[in-house]
Image (spheres, rainbow, N blue to C red):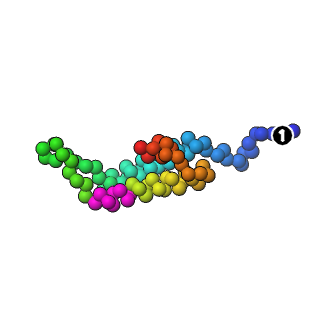
Amino acid sequence: MYNNKMNDKQVKKPTIEETMRQIELEAEAKVIQGYKTGQIQMSTLSGNRKTLQPIKNADHQLDVLKNIMEEGAKNFEAAAGRKMTYAEMRSMFG
């Protein structure tokens, strides 16, 4: 007779939703760390509060964010065995 109980040594594979949530949390933590270290900066309002000041080193900041997303995509593919869909990418990274 077949016994479908898991052995104590077997580890339950996380669902796609659990994997996505973990990647989302890791990405958020990296972005927060980027703000704290100054690698990522937000636009600021000008003195007249009508325009945004340009971000210094914008290309570098885009690279930092792109690298976070690329790492998340690799982790997703490793866990799911496939590339993420556009909807999954938007769900995790906004």
Q: Is residue 47 visible?
A: yes
Left or right: residue 72 compared with residue 43: right
Q: Quadrant of residue 94?
A: top left
Q: Residue 59 or 8: which is nearer the viewer?
A: 59
Q: Is residue 57 above or below residue 28?
A: below
Count of all numbered marks drawn on residues in the image: 1
Task: Give the secondary structure at mark 1.
Answer: loop
Amino acid type for the residue under numbered disc 1: Tyr
In the image as oriented, which residue stretches furthest toward the left? 48
Residue 37: x percent and y percent?
A: 33, 56
Q: Is residue 71 above or below residue 18?
A: below
Q: Residue at x 33, y 57 (%)?
A: 61
Crowd band around label 1 with a 10 angstrom C-alpha radius: few (<14), some (14–19), many (20+): few
Tell me the magenta residue range: 57-64
Residue 92: x percent and y percent?
A: 47, 44
Q: Which residue is mark 1?
A: 2
Q: Residue at x 60, y 42 (%)?
A: 15
Residue 13: x percent and y percent?
A: 64, 46
Secondary structure of the magenta portion, mostly? helix
Left or right: residue 16 compared with residue 42: right
Quarter of the image that includes the N terminus: top right
Residue 22: x percent and y percent?
A: 51, 46
In the image as oriented, which residue stretches furthest toward the front? 86
Task: Find out whether residue 8 is within the magenta segment.
Answer: no
